[in-house]
Amino acid sequence: MTRPRPLAGPLLAVATLVLVLTACGDPVVGTVTAKEHDAAETTHGTRKDCTTSTSSTGTKTTKCKTVPTTKHEPEEWELTVAEDDGDTVEVDVDQDAYERIEVGDRYDETAEASR
C-alpha cells in the first residue's frame, strides 16, 4: 500500500512564488518622457565619536575623538516613464539601456529584463 505524499512543501513553494511575483507589481510599460543621469559622488567628512565611562566612585568621564568618514553614492541612470494607465514612474536602468533608449521611445520592463 502506498502512502500519499504530503503536498505542504510544494504548495508552500508555489504560494511563496505567487506572493513574490505579485508583490513586485505589474511591469512598467509606457513612453519615456525624461532621462536623468547622476554621476558617482564620494564625500569625505568627520563625525564625533564619544564614549562615557563611570569610575567605581561614580565619576563620569566622556572622551571624544574625531573620526573621518567617507560616503560613496554610485552612478545612477534613470528613466521617467508615462505608463499606459496614466501613472508616471521612475525606473532605474543600467548604462547600456540609458544610452540606447531615447525620450519618446516605448519602454517595456519585461522586454528590457530579457535583454
Image (tube, rainbow, N blue to C red):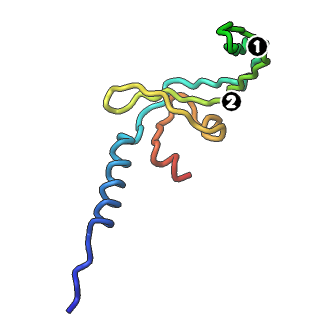
Q: Is residue 18 above or below residue 73?
A: below
Viewer can see residue 3: yes
Report which quarter residue 43 is drawn in: top right
Sequence-wise, which precedes: disc 2 or disc 1? Answer: 1
Viewer can see residue 52: no
Q: Secondary structure at mark 2?
A: loop
Q: Is residue 40 above or below residue 54?
A: below
Counting from the top left corner in percent of width and height, residue 98 is at 61, 35
Q: Secondary structure at mark 1?
A: strand
Position of the N terminus by quadrant: bottom left
71 or 76, which is in the foreground? 71
Q: Is residue 103 left or right of residue 95?
A: left
Q: Which residue is mark 1?
A: 46
Amino acid at dot 2: Pro
Q: Residue at the location (45% across, 31% down)?
A: 31
Counting from the top left corner in percent of width and height, residue 93 is at 57, 37
Q: Which residue is mark 2?
A: 74
Amino acid at dot 1: Thr
The local crowd at label 1, few if under 14, some if 14 to 19, many if 20 or more residues have their Cα within 10 Å, is few
Q: Is residue 82 left or right of residue 60?
A: left
Question: Residue furthest toward the bottom?
Answer: 1
Counting from the top left corner in percent of width and height, residue 13 is at 35, 60
Q: Is residue 56 above or below residue 86?
A: above
For the residues labelled 2 and 1, the Cα–Cα distance comes to 20 Å
